[in-house]
Image (cartoon, helix red, strand yellow):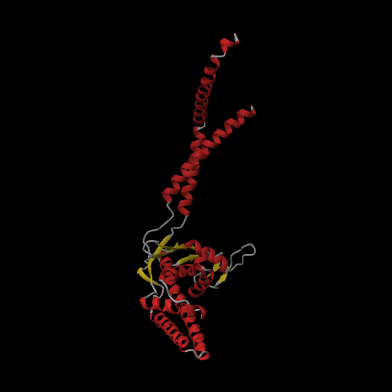
Amino acid sequence: MSEQHLPSQPGDFQMQPYADDEIDLKELFGVLWTGKFQIMGVTVMATIIAVAMAINMPNIYRSEALLAPVSASGGGMGGLASKFGGLASLAGISLPSGGSDKTGLGIEVMKSRQFMQDFIAKRQILPDLMAAEAWDRSSGDIVVDDDVYDVQAQQWLREVDPPRTPEPSVQEAHEVFQQVLSVSQDKESGLVTIAIEHMSPIVAQQWVTWLVQDINETMRKQDVEQAERSISYLTEQIQSTSISELQAGFFDLIQQQTETIMLAKASPEYLFKTIDPAVVPELKAKPKRALIAVLGTMLGGMLGVLIVLIRHYAFREDG
């Protein structure tokens, strides 16, 4: 009898999962249909919350400028670098070999804390960066949060936990500025894009313009100071050596550093040349309010389904 029953067992095992799956699927749809009003309620509530959040979020405008790196290399400089590269390295002089390295350096300097500190202090943008609450379209002015900053007294009033202070530190301001600043370079063309996002389109455009001016000025100043130090050092070396070949090489290096100083002082756009300047944007970049509402509705529906299933199966297990 056992041998006659065994052949039917595989068929039983094959049919059983399908029967269980069909029963579970019907039960699942039945549970969801029973809790349809709960799902609808959660979905509607989530949609209302998402729409309210989207409406209350301020418009953010994006202004950007397209820049072309200014190459400092040339045929004469390349020949000079190959001829006197050893002497230059001893003197601590970096002869130009191409514009790409300096471009990368300029981008990193722009993102640095020191540059950001100098930029914020020079342009007096800390209240607009850390205390802006809204933008008045009619007047074009920034509305500052009175609980954070007193415009009349020029005093910070915000309440923060240590180690933060009422007046934002350089590190905190740098962190916030990194969130609104975007710097990217196209690998194929080498063009650099600098962008600022802010609730005021006027401020966004102004900051981009200032950033281009200040990074050019900073890099020009650094190169001039380095060239002047190199000339001073080379002059001392000429006086301390009697070898005519070394003196000739030092004179050539001094000439190169003098040309660097002349070029820097004569070029307002020393590192980056503006191809497409920043303009005041007319349309907002974000938030995408329709997308926020759709996502809120979808998440609300998923949450409603999850709540109905959890309540049903939890109560069934308890029973």
What is the residue that sits farthest to the left in this orientation? 275
Q: What is the count of numbered marks?
A: 0
Q: Quadrant of the N terminus?
A: top right
Quarter-of-image position of residue 189: bottom left
Q: Nearer the viewer, residue 163 or 107?
A: 107
Q: Position of residue 106 (x, y in %)?
A: 46, 70
Q: Quadrant of the C terminus?
A: top right
Quarter-of-image position of residue 220: bottom left
Q: Nearer the viewer, residue 230 or 267?
A: 230
Determine the residue positioned at 51% across, 87% down. 237
Q: Position of residue 206 (x, y in %)?
A: 42, 69
Q: Position of residue 67 (x, y in %)?
A: 38, 68
Q: Nearer the viewer, residue 153 or 20?
A: 20
Q: Position of residue 153 (x, y in %)?
A: 55, 73
Determine the residue positioned at 42% across, 52% down. 288
What is the residue that sits farthest to the top in this orientation? 1
Residue 268 is at least partly visible in this image: no
Residue 50 is at least partly visible in this image: yes
Q: Nearer the viewer, residue 62 or 216?
A: 216
Quarter-of-image position of residue 270: bottom left
Task: Establish if 163 lies above or below 10.
Answer: below
Task: Establish if 129 lies above or below 229.
Answer: above
